[in-house]
Amino acid sequence: SGITVIRAGELVSQSSLLELETRSMQSVLDTTDAYPQLFFPSTPSLLLARHSRGRFTFCEEHKLACMKVEARSAQESLRSFGVFLEEVRDKAMNEWEGKGLSLVFRGGRMAVHERKGGVGLPDEMLKHFV
């Protein structure tokens, strides 16, 4: 058995995408936390649907392009993360070539682990990523 891909619909431009979140009316959105969720996949907008006891009454849109304060506050951590990803890439290409790796975030620390055994995607799916 395998995975069956059913092609339907049509491709849409990246600018047409948005992320949808739901919160109660009393809950506060921390846009500093929301910024990386929009930044990494280049999702231009976050639509926040507000509800009171499950009844949705209000939507607010947060645009990535307007999150200037959040972008400034995230710069240092994003820069550090970029350096980390470069180190992982270099190490993977030089020392771990051909090995299955997993990035794991646990207890406030990011680590690279070598996967053991036959865990992972089947070979017929892996060929699309090599």
Image (tube, rainbow, N blue to C red):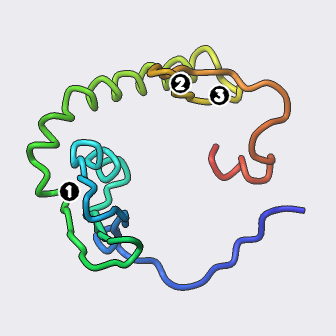
Q: Position of residue 79 (x, y in %)?
A: 26, 27
Q: Nearer the viewer, mark 3 or mark 1?
A: 1
For label 3, the crowd category at 10 Å Cα-Cα, with few meaning under 14, some 14 to 19 and many 20 or more, is some
Q: Is residue 66 above or below residue 13?
A: above
**Residue occupying the far top of the picture:** 95
* Left or right of residue 125: residue 44: left
Query: Which quadrant: the N terminus?
Result: bottom right
Amino acid type of the residue tagged 2 in the rendering: Arg
The circle on residue 64 is 1
- Point 49% across, 26% down: residue: 89
Q: Nearer the viewer, mark 2 or mark 3?
A: 2
Q: Earlier in the sequence, mark 2 or mark 1?
A: 1
Amino acid type of the residue tagged 3 in the rendering: Leu
Identify the residue under disc 2: 106
* Left or right of residue 78: residue 106: right
- Point 65% across, 28% down: residue: 101
The circle on residue 101 is 3
